Image (cartoon, rainbow, N blue to C red):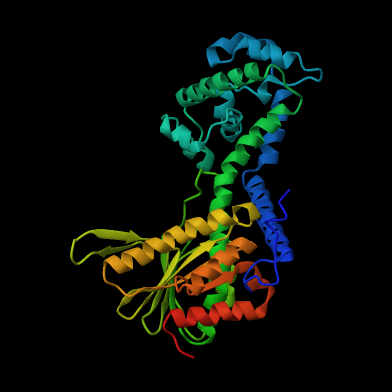
Amino acid sequence: MVGEEALTYGTNSPSFASSPEEIRIAVEQNALDRGILLIKVIVSLQVDKVLSLVEGLGQSYDKEDFCELANEIGVDKAALRIIDDVNLPVSYLCYFCTPDLLVEHPELVFYYRNMAMLSRKVMRGIGLDTSSVEDAGERPSPQMARELAVYFNTIVSALLKGAGTITPYRHVVMMMGNVGDALGGVSRNEVGRVAMMRILNPLVARLHSRGFLASIAYSLKGQITLDDDDSGAEERKWIEITPHTNVQELLDRFETYRVLYHELRMVNGSRLLLNAQLKWVDPITGETYKVGPDLHSHVGDTDLLWAGELKGGADPAGSDEHWKTATEALRRITDAARRTDRRKPQLSFIAAILVDRVARAAQSWIDNGDLTSVYNLTQMYEKREEMDRYLNDMVRFLGCQG
């Protein structure tokens, strides 16, 4: 159970505290984001096609020939006997591959790698990088195909022997289980990227409508991959913004191709930077302090007038941890500013949900002068006044007027 404590919402709660209904909305949105991500991955990887190919090949292979070849390609015959013991017929090819099979059908490297519970990062680390095969569809050389087949088959043999038994669809579960594990890392990155997009897209539209926005630095991640951290992106680009720029069309393109914002530059020279690290030096001791807020503004001669920490996760049980990591980052900023004789920056916390106890803790920070503002991302999309409050504050944090 989520816990009644997590959903507590009292009459004296700060206005930015998430109500039970707002928490449900945030959880629902997060579930939709993750579900759509999974569907996109399955479609982009052509998982259905790969499974159909394995099933089709399994109907035409020679079982006796495979048994004779088993020892040479890393297949333990004890594992084959486990497959034979299944009531319904299961093809050996659902679990094991041959070098010739990988050369003829390079798309199956993806399937058998996941059957062996291996990530692409691990494959690179052991000198069996499958990127050229999985990304470009290149055929592996006969030598590489043999090395891959032996390695995959040895691991899968041990997995089957460890399980002791299988079901007719166990191979699908095993393959998708490893895909899901890889998707977990991608999903966490994507939650953060989408949250950043949801707070910056409206800001871009507002700044453009007021004539404040001069240019945007960005890169596009493009198609979703499962290359562990999904870190690939196009080279950083700049786009100049004019009064005639069709910003909605631009934002639609950003959403389609998965934008990563890097910087927004204003006509007055102010800048909003994303995930940019600053190095401040103590003028007396010479010690260097590094701070890297999720967002910060550079206005005039002040390289960090404002900083914000953003948490896009929607798990109520994780709200405390999000607050803890955010405040640790904000404290580092405040401490570094004090030690380097800088003006204390204005600080903000932005989160998809703020359970009552976190909202009250944030309010205490505001009352003590340690925090300038708090924004509830879900409220911003549910209540026009909350979005306006955030946008008006951001315009001010960027040193713009009007």
Tell me which corner region of the image, top left, top right, bottom left or bottom right, holds residue 114.
Answer: top right
Q: Is residue 353 above or below residue 81?
A: below
Give the camera-side residue of 164 and 285.
285
15 vs 299, left or right, is right
Relative vertical location of residue 230 with respect to residue 306 in this rendering, above or below: above
In this rendering, does residue 257 appear at all?
Answer: no
- Residue at horizontal 53 percent and vertical 64 percent from the top: 196
Q: Residue at x 66, y 48 (%)?
A: 38
**In the image, 334: left or right of 94?**
left
* Residue in the image at 62% along x and 44% along y: 45
Please provide percent x and percent y for residue 158. Answer: 59, 18
- Is residue 261 in view? yes
Q: Nearer the viewer, residue 349 or 237?
A: 349
Judged from this view, the residue extending furthest toward the bottom is 402
Percent position of residue 71, x then y: 56, 10
Q: Is residue 22 above or below residue 202?
A: above
Q: Is residue 170 left or right of residue 113?
A: right
Q: Quadrant of residue 179?
A: top right
- In front: 95, or 200? 200
> How far from the left and from the top, in percent, is residue 83?
71, 17
